[in-house]
Amino acid sequence: MTKASELKARQTAAVTNGVGTKGIYATRAENAELWDVDGRRFIDFAAGIAVVNTGHRHPKIMAAVAEQAALFTHTCFHVAPYESYIRLAERLNTIAPVTGPAKTMLVTTGAEAVENAIKIARISTGRTAVIAFAGGFHGRTMMGMALTGKVVPYKKGFGPFPAEVYHAPFPNDFMGLSVDQALAGLDMLLAADVDPARVAAFIIEPVQGEGGFLPAPAAFLQALRALADKHGILLIADEVQSGMARTGKMFGIEHAGVKADLVTMAKGLGGGFPLSAVVGRADLMDSAHVGGLGGTYAGSPIAIAAANAVLDVIEDEKLCDRAAAIGAKITGRLKDIASRQGMEAIGDIRGPGAMVAFELVTDRESRTADTALVTAIVAEAEQRGLILLSCGTRFNVIRLLPPLTIPDAHLDEGLDILEASLEAAVRVRA
């Protein structure tokens, strides 16, 4: 019996089945490589779901964490605040894509950031309704699930959800839903279901994560900004997965030239340590009364030390440029594979920067989702030493999220494994 199978048996006995996992039990990791308890080596194209954009155990991040750990690990910012929190807030206020002076609050998880953004939107506008978008993912808390536009596995059986959350269409060219059609659906929602005067905020992922790495077209985000301004509605950009240089810019919404009123961020912000943030217009952020925002673990000193180092690494190593280069290489390889006879299962390739995905279909005419092929490719890649993740509302998308610090040799090795896994899975299907 392998060590992994032993751990699997122990997990089955001790951990709730509701926590889904892969069968890779990590023992150590370095940059874009990960080793399991049986000594197997993997190229990591998941990066902890876009968390370690700066790679596993980046030396500058580990040094910053060690330095902070030698001083103190927790005081609670409400009890005994610390300079590093203020410094990180100042830096995020400078880079966040919001209009005018900004302010920041720090919390722990992406869902917590989303929850607080909704609180701020409601108290600052005096309105209660929120409009999210089909296919969006905003967390697993009750409000997060209400906002999320994907039922399985996130919402199934967990309702009822908080009231006054509405969903509008999200553009998807591949499935034939244009920007104009999505905007018409939003107009219908505002005419038939909820008075715009009751809507506190739109919340949208500039690039959908769990929804299948669908970028919101620039025209859609620009129209949404105009509609928000017309009705006094706030625009919340959920940058939890698309932020921190992942798309080739610091934040995904920057590709559209649009600014938000509030921005949520997490994942890549902490470089592997739990940290999230809400950054927004100062007048909105200050609308909450003293004590209305925060939490015992909000703004961990250890995670803040990591985040300040993450921002240094992104700047020093030009990771926005690196993300664009990685994405170009991945996209080029995928397009080459898709052009070959027998690879018609690759229906679409999309995503900005190093946030790339490809959608698997039974054929390019019907565009019917091929979920079995996705499962086969992910399993084959794992056997060959590559960690992949799937996503999409139809469960037929494979997303590629290598660390932005991945060496070229490891990127090429991972793409070679991906190509071989694709070919092997397609042969079996045929």
Image (tube, helix red, strand yellow):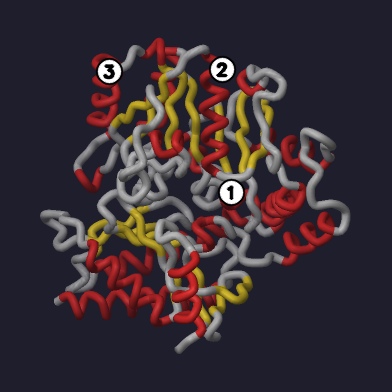
Q: Nearer the viewer, residue 394 or 324?
A: 394
Is mark 3 in CB contact (under 8 Å) with mark 2? no
Left or right of 59? Residue 411 is left
Left or right of 128? Residue 397 is left
Left or right of 141? Residue 245 is right
Residue 27 at x, y percent in the picture: 60, 76
Q: Earlier in the sequence, mark 2 or mark 1?
A: 2
Q: Earlier in the sequence, mark 3 or mark 2?
A: 2
- Binning the other alpha carbons within 10 Å of mark 3 as few (below 14), some (14 to 19) or many (20 upward) gives few
Location of residue 356 with respect to 12 vertically, above or below: above
Q: Which residue is mark 1?
A: 244
Q: How many marks do you count on the picture?
A: 3
- Binning the other alpha carbons within 10 Å of mark 1 as few (below 14), some (14 to 19) or many (20 upward) gives many
The quarter of the rendered structure image containing the N terminus is bottom left
Location of residue 37 with respect to 244 vertically, above or below: below
Q: Which residue is mark 2?
A: 123
Residue 250 at x, y percent in the picture: 58, 45
Q: Which residue is mark 3?
A: 193
Q: Earlier in the sequence, mark 3 or mark 1?
A: 3
* Dot label at residue 120: none
At 48% across and 26% down in the image, what residue appears? 235
Is mark 2 in CB contact (under 8 Å) with mark 1? no
The image quadrant of residue 203 is top left
Mark 2: which amino acid?
Ile
Single out the mark in the foreground, 2 or 1.
2
Give how far apart the Cα atoms at labels 3 and 1 are.
Answer: 36 Å
Secondary-structure class at tag 1: loop
Mark 3: which amino acid?
Asp
Give how far apart the Cα atoms at labels 3 and 2 are.
Answer: 22 Å
Mark 1: which amino acid?
Met
